[in-house]
Amino acid sequence: MQRSIDTIKFVGNRIKYFRHSCGMTRDESAREIGVSPRTLAAYERGEREMSLNTAISIARLYNVTVNMITDEHKIGK
């Protein structure tokens, strides 16, 4: 169970990183993704899991792949 929680938090941190890298606010990103700013904040804090469709929408918005958001083993390689 701890591994799953760590992964969700990792993904949340990556989402926030890519949002900041794109210079977008949480409100702007949430609107484009189709979720509320509160929901996006919960994703970024690792408090809520997202659907695959939402992950794809986030990846497209930030011009990255879903793997870049989710795969902690590829960071910096």
Image (cartoon, rainbow, N blue to C red):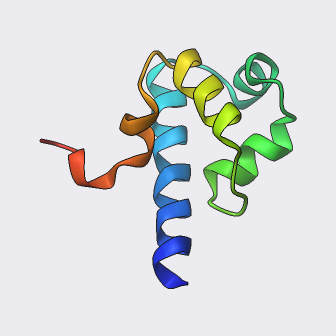
Residue at 71% x, 44% y: name it. Answer: 51
Q: Position of residue 32 (x, y in %)?
A: 75, 16
Q: What residue is at 51 percent from the left and 83 percent from the top?
A: 2
**Image quadrant assignment for residue 64:** top left
Q: With respect to residue 12, does 15 lie above or below?
A: above
Residue 66 locus on image (x, y percent): 46, 33
Q: Is residue 23 above or below residue 1?
A: above
Residue 28 to residue 66: above or below? above
Residue positioned most to the bottom: 1
Left or right, 63 with reference to 68: right
Q: Position of residue 70 (x, y in %)?
A: 43, 47
Tell me which corner region of the image, top left, top right, bottom left or bottom right, holds residue 21.
Answer: top left
Query: What residue sits 36% from the left and 36% below the top?
Result: 68
Q: Nearer the viewer, residue 67 or 34?
A: 67
Residue 55 in the image, given as x and y percentages of width and height:
61, 35
Q: Which quarter of the rendered picture does the C terminus lie within?
A: top left
Q: Horizontal placement of 77 versus 4: left or right? A: left
38 lies left or right of 24: right
